[in-house]
Image (cartoon, rainbow, N blue to C red):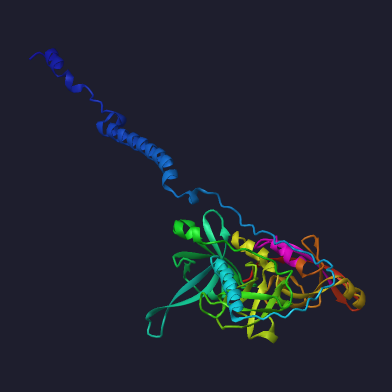
Amino acid sequence: MPEGKENRNLSFIQETIKQKRFYQSRIMHRLVRSVVSGVLFAFAALAVWAVAIPQIMPEERQAELQPITLPEPEEHPEEEADPPVYIMEQVNIELEDYKKMYQQLIQIGNQVQKSLVNVSAVTTDTDWFEETYTSQSSVSGVLVGDNGLELLILTDYGKVEDGENFLITFYDHTSAPAVLKKYDRNTGLAVLSVNLGDLSDSTREVIVYADIGSSKTLRNGEPVIALGSPCGNYGSVLYGNLTSVSQTAGLYDGSYNVLTTDMIKARSGSGVLISWSGKIIGMIQERCEVAAQDHTIQAYGISDIMDVIEHLSNNQDIVYMGIAGTDVTTALSELEEIPIGVYVSEVAMDSPAIESGIQPGDIITSMSGQPVTNLKDVMAILMKCSNGQNIQVICQRLNKTSYQELELSVNLRILE
């Protein structure tokens, strides 16, 4: 075969076969179509959920969190009264009259009971044989209000601090789970919350939020009613009188009004004191604040703990400094020739106050740039502070014969 002809017949062997680029392959085309379809499907799903969620979620879940603000009780200043006019008239009180009076008192109590709940705290533990067991304690609670998402309940922290699960029983005997929202170890108060979505419509119609009164206008001898669990069991009721309205509980960084009564105290009693007008005037405390009356029911005056209740209900921290003190009034200042302010009688160990250098005998005259003339000022300033905040505290310290001004930095924190 001629050489030229052979070359022409075999020339195709020398051609180069080019591979398709990776993005031109069938597999790549299918992969791209799958990705695009997936993205479109995802956008379509998001659009559907954006339209559907508002329709299927309960209304309360869409509501904005509303801050809890307790109404300020009306204070009626004492006015000079005209001399009393005594009318001497003999009245025979029959047994039926007493019955009618107590029926009216029972009606007042029944109405307030709608604002009270029973809090069951369940704790799980193990015994010596490594077997698990549960224990349960109960305490009364007060319906403070709701923030649009949660129902808020004020109760005694000492009874629930070890609880792992909480169950709230309402006036209509229905129950709902709750969680511990916030607490203040100093006053022994805590707030629990119940999801509004866990309440039936019938329960919402029955319950009533607490009607808060004033403890500042009370007088010795006034009749009161103890509700909740004053005898240790939920639903118990006691009738009595106030024996003192001027006692105080000296806690860290402040003092709180304590109401004492002539009603016998139960070891595990809790609940509220109400006036005959049906308003809550005090929170019963298990711990004894007035030692001379340790066998009778004592309660914090509601007016002094309003700020604490609001802070806890709004999930705000309550910080402490860690001092016990006494007011240095103008009269005492002139008599003893000492500065006006708060005399520090005690400083708690491991507290922010002792870490900053505050000592017993110091007189606090200013905190965070605001003048301090009494313990109420200290309480008000601390209520505006947050956990971990540093504030400047000005103290007067006795140096041989005169007082010397000191400026100290206090790092506030929560009492654990």
- The picture places residue 186, in percent across and down from the top left corner, at 65, 72
Q: Residue at x 37, y 81 (%)?
A: 131
* Residue 380 image position (x, y, % from top left): 73, 63
User: Is residue 58 or residue 212 the one in the foreground?
Assistant: 212
Tell me if residue 384 is in the magenta stretch. Answer: yes
The quarter in which the C terminus is drawn is bottom right
Q: x%, y% of residue 405?
A: 86, 68
**Could you say which is closer to the camera, residue 151 or residue 48?**
151
Direction from residue 142 to residue 254 in the image, left or right: right
Quadrant position of the N terminus in the picture = top left
For the question of whether residue 211 can be seen, the reply is yes
Name the residue: 81% across, 66% down: 372
Confirm whether residue 251 shows in the render.
Answer: no
135 up-or-down from 22: above or below: below
Q: Residue 221 at x, y = what percent? A: 72, 78
Query: For this view, does 175 lie left or right of residue 360?
Result: left
Residue stretch in magenta: 377-396
Q: Is residue 403 magenta?
A: no
